[in-house]
Amino acid sequence: MTLRKVAKALLLTFVIFTCGYAVGREVGVRHALEGVAGQDAKPVEAAGGPERRLVVRYFHSTKRCVTCNTIEAHARSALDKHFAGEMANGVVAWQTANMDEAWHTDAVERYGLMRSSLVLVDMRGDEEEDYIVLKRVWDLTGDEQGFHDYVHGAARMVLDGWAEEDEPDEPDEAEEDEE
């Protein structure tokens, strides 16, 4: 009888330990996926950073294919390579967003997303000024340099557009002649 009680106690301890380990591991994995550097966040909020920001959002579903993971990796790599300084000072920000999460439903509808997508969002404070959905990312996954060039060019176009908005208007030649 004593041997039976010891076996039950050992078996019960094993089951409790295994369940605890499985739950702890699942929580850890979810935390790592959702909170890596605050990247898989709820909608972007201005947090004392620059007034004007370019937020590069990678929207994905819960279940991802190899191509979806490649798009994310290439996009992040392109930003790290071409915009390291801007990312360090908060002018360019990276964010992942799970399309299946309820708090992203409005953005998914606003951007017209049907599958994993990369979106450049021009932000002033906490308001969206404009956005661009980079539709060619799916076609360029097999060409990392082409992918980098595409993302870099689109992001540079947005950032350069800010500089043009800040430049004073040149007087028209007709106005100069009238004076």
Image (spheres, helix red, strand yellow):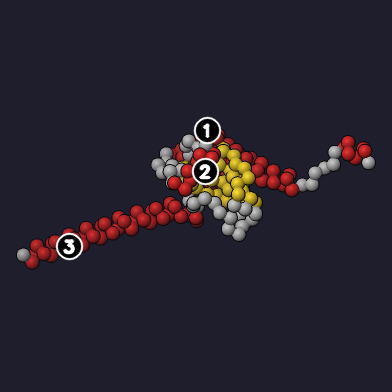
Q: Earlier in the sequence, mark 3 or mark 1?
A: 3
Name the outermost residue toward the top. Answer: 139
Q: Are marks 2 and 1 in contact (CB under 8 Å)?
A: no
Mark 3 residue type? Leu
Q: What residue is pinned by disc 3?
A: 10
> Vertically, is 7 above or below 132?
below
Q: Earlier in the sequence, mark 2 or mark 1?
A: 2
Neighbor class of circle 3 (other Cα within 10 Å; few <14, some 14-19, many 20+) is few
Q: CA distance from mark 2 to mark 1?
A: 23 Å
> Vertically, is 131 above or below 32?
above
Dot in front, 2 or 1: 2
Snapshot quadrant of residue 89: bottom right
Q: Which mark is residue 76?
A: none
Dot in front, 3 or 2: 2
Task: Give left or right: position of 95 versus 91.
Answer: left
Task: Give left or right: position of 146 versus 9.
Answer: right
Q: What residue is pinned by disc 2?
A: 107
Q: CA distance from mark 3 to mark 1?
A: 56 Å
Mark 2 residue type? Ala
SS label for mark 3: helix
Q: Nearer the viewer, residue 124 or 116?
A: 124
Q: CA distance from mark 3 to mark 2?
A: 52 Å
Quadrant location of the C terminus in the rendered image: top right
Please state the horizontal and vertical placement of residue 104, each as a whole percent of the image.
48, 46
Mark 1 residue type? Asp
Neighbor class of circle 1 (other Cα within 10 Å; few <14, some 14-19, many 20+) is few
Q: What residue is pinned by disc 1?
A: 139
Q: Earlier in the sequence, mark 3 or mark 2?
A: 3
Residue at 43% in and 46% down: 101
SS label for mark 2: helix
> Vertically, is 17 above or below 169?
below
